[in-house]
Amino acid sequence: PLFQFMTGIKDDLNARAPLYKDDWGKPRSVFTVINATVFAFIIQLIPALIFAELMARETQNNLAVAEVVLSSAVIGIIYAIFAGQPLVIMGITGPVAILLGTSYRLTQTFEAEYFPFFFWVCIWAGAMHIVSSMIGLVNLVWKVTPFTSQIFEFFIGISFIYLSGRDLIEPLYLGQSDVDPAERAGQYATLLLGILTCYISYTLHFAETWTLFTRQVRTVLTAYNTLFAVVIVTGLSYLPGVDMGTLDRVDVLAPWDWQPTADRPWVTNPLQGMSASAIFGAIIPGLMFFLLFIIDHNVSSILSQVPKYNLKKPAAYHWDFFVLGITFIPCAILGLPPGNGLIPQAPLHVRALCTRKIETDKYGVKREVVTYVEEQRWSGLGQALLMFVALAAFRVISWIPRGALFGLLLYLGIGALH
């Protein structure tokens, strides 16, 4: 039956609790876990920086890069420690930025202040997650077929490709003659740097299949492909003739002063400027978050546990959705955007934890076969903790050209389709 009170959560805890100590045990390959941690951090951070720009526009700069990165750290730590399936990595997505813009515009309708209203949005959304996991509504995930999850991943991949292509090509001022040549040169440089970033990342993605170099070198090239791409392209962007003074770079306040972007305290007063109608009106965007996450998060979880990875430890969909609901509480108190399991970053994180080999089938087609996966909590926790390093390194992040961001987004889109 679809609705069974607490049955799903009890089954999940009974299945995963005996394995919790093993999740924190020493991995078979510490090197693989470290590589996956850095890889997950990079592929999480870059889209977060892009979506933070969208969020800043949608919320009139009330929520920006600092809040997005801090949220990724906080909810990532909670999920890595308490979730049943810790291989799913958490973060902020584009639809979240759009929904936060919707909630921002609703404050005008209810004549409410934004962050107290946002507090109640998170509380209602979190409550819906918790209740739905307790009554067994998450059983709907068993209705999701491989075709459904693949179509969803296809949609995300196409969205990433479209967004990156749009932001690389649209600013070129094609067909316009009254544009400053230096400005046009900067946009063309952004386009070329974006293409180069995607090319390096995607080429190194398959370095393990090369015959060049030693196996250890090929493994490092594959594991740190995105990091190598960003470092190389950032270095090239400072060469004479590349940056004519008009090359766009990541727009962050460097160094960050560990204060919110808006002029407000970190802890939100939930009743300040709020009427009863505004408190209950926050149910509307709260419901929208619930409907988004019950699909987005669970599909991310399904894609991270597909049969090709040969995972040995069981899934915990009900308990994981309960923990996801808990992550709304710190978001409400601190005024941070909520997040959920990422697509395609979460499945790519699992792939990075795999030991793989290439086999040729009877038709002569080479296929990647997974022989072992490091099923542990260290990489999920580590990539979340690295977000605090990113917050302290805003000056370094400000060196990265925006073309590199969109190039990595293009790589993630292509990788999802592959």
Image (cartoon, rainbow, N blue to C red):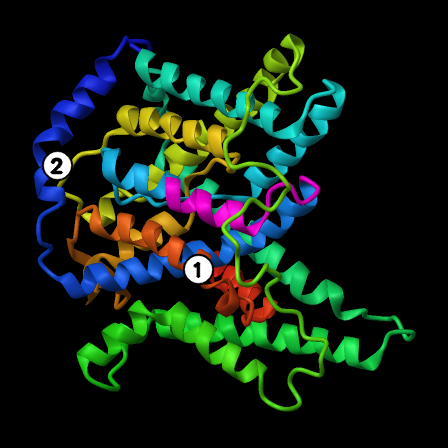
CA–CA distance in space, label 1 to label 2: 32 Å
Name the N-terminal-most of marks 1 and 2. Answer: 2
As helix, strand or loop, the secondary structure at mark 2 comes to: helix
Residue in front for this viewpoint, 415 or 78:
78
- Quarter of the figure with the N terminus: top left
Mark in the foreground, 1 or 2: 1
Q: Quadrant of residue 264?
A: top right
Mark linked to residue 46: none
Q: Which residue is mark 2?
A: 20
Residue displayed at 65% across by 29% down: 114
Task: Name the residue type under label 1.
Answer: Ala
Q: Is 253 inside the magenta-drawn segment?
A: no
The vertical placement of 132 against 255, above or below, is above
Residue in front for this viewpoint, 111 or 14:
111
Q: Quadrant of residue 204?
A: bottom left
Q: Is 60 inside the magenta-drawn segment?
A: yes
Please report the bounds of the magenta region as a residue range: 59-74
The vertical placement of 95 against 226, above or below, is above
Residue displayed at 36% across by 21% down: 140
Q: Which residue is mark 1?
A: 392
Q: Residues within 10 Å of mark 1 (few under 14, many from 20)?
A: some
Residue in front for this viewpoint, 228 or 65:
65
Q: How many marks?
A: 2
